[in-house]
Each structure stands twice: as C-alpha cells, then as structure tokens.
Amino acid sequence: MPIQPPGAEGLVGYVDLDPAFAAGLKDLTGFSHLILIYHLHRVEGYSLEVIPFLDDSPHGIFATRSPKRPNAIGLSIVRLLAVEGARLSFANPDMLDGTPLLDIKPYVAAFDRVDPEREGWLSGRAGNCVAARSDDRFSKR
C-alpha cells in the first residue's frame, strides 16, 4: 500500500457513511479536496522512536508520519471525485480498506496551505513517497 496519497496516483477510494449522516455531506461537492481523519486500527501499540519508510535511521515519532503513534490517528488530504448519497469517492487513497473514518473536513487553501521553511530530515526525500510502499513494520502481527 502507498505510504502517502501521491503514491496512490490513479486509484479511487470510497467512504461509505451511515445513511443517517448523508445530510452532513450537503455542499461538500463545492470543494475539490477533503481532509480525512481516521483511526489507524491495524497498528498495535506505539513507539516514541521509529525508523520511518523514507529513511533508515530512527527519528522521534512526532517528527515522522509513521502510523505507530500514541494516538493512532491518521490524516490524508484527498481529491473529492463524487458524492452519491452517503458515499464519497476520492482519488489517491493511502489508507487500508475498512479503516474507521473519524471525520471529514473540507480542505481550504487559505486555511490549510503553508509553505514550510524547513522540512527536517525529510528534506529532499519527500518525493520518494510516490514509489515507497508500506511493509509490516507498524501493523499487528
């Protein structure tokens, strides 16, 4: 599985909400991108230092996007393709099938976009996420 949305280029993901929440999707089609917040339900425990997918050296968990976090919360920014009833389709999914969704928020560039001055140990490596794939280092065994 891809480790970030750019690595899932061309794939389509779906969110199937309980139909009781369908009214909450009103006006969502006016946004091109969404922020999906979800539970990393296949990760067991956490580590304060991890060796992330794009490096071979240990880093503090909060300086990585590793799923082995104390709070087990994942976040992805995805392109919304369609809203059909209680179903959303989106481009470039980077979460497992069956991942429990916690919340959906519209992505708004004026609120959410930041041009960083520093990217820490990921400097020059972030582009490698397109080809990188997850392994079992963070999942339940």
Image: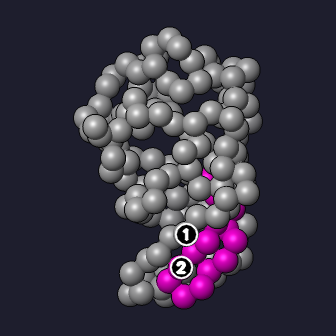
The quadrant of the picture occupied by the C terminus is top left
**25 to 75, vertically: above or below:** below
Q: Which residues are magenta?
A: 77-90
| Residue 30 image point, x, y percent | 71, 76
Quarter occupied by residue 119: top right
Quarter occupied by residue 91: bottom right
Q: Are marks 2 and 1 in contact (CB under 8 Å)?
A: yes
Residue at figure coordinates x 37%, y 53% from the top left: 39
Kindly state the secondary structure of the residue where label 2 is placed: strand
Residue at figure coordinates x 31%, y 25% from the top left: 47
What's under tag 1, amino acid-wise?
A: Tyr
In three-dimensional space, the C-alpha distance between marks 2 and 1, rounded to whole angstroms, equals 7 Å
Residue 101 shows up from this direction: yes
Residue at figure coordinates x 70%, y 71% from the top left: 81
**126 to 104, vertically: above or below:** above
| Number of residues whose C-alpha sits closer than 10 Å to that of mark 1, classed few (under 14), some (14–19) or many (20 or more) | some
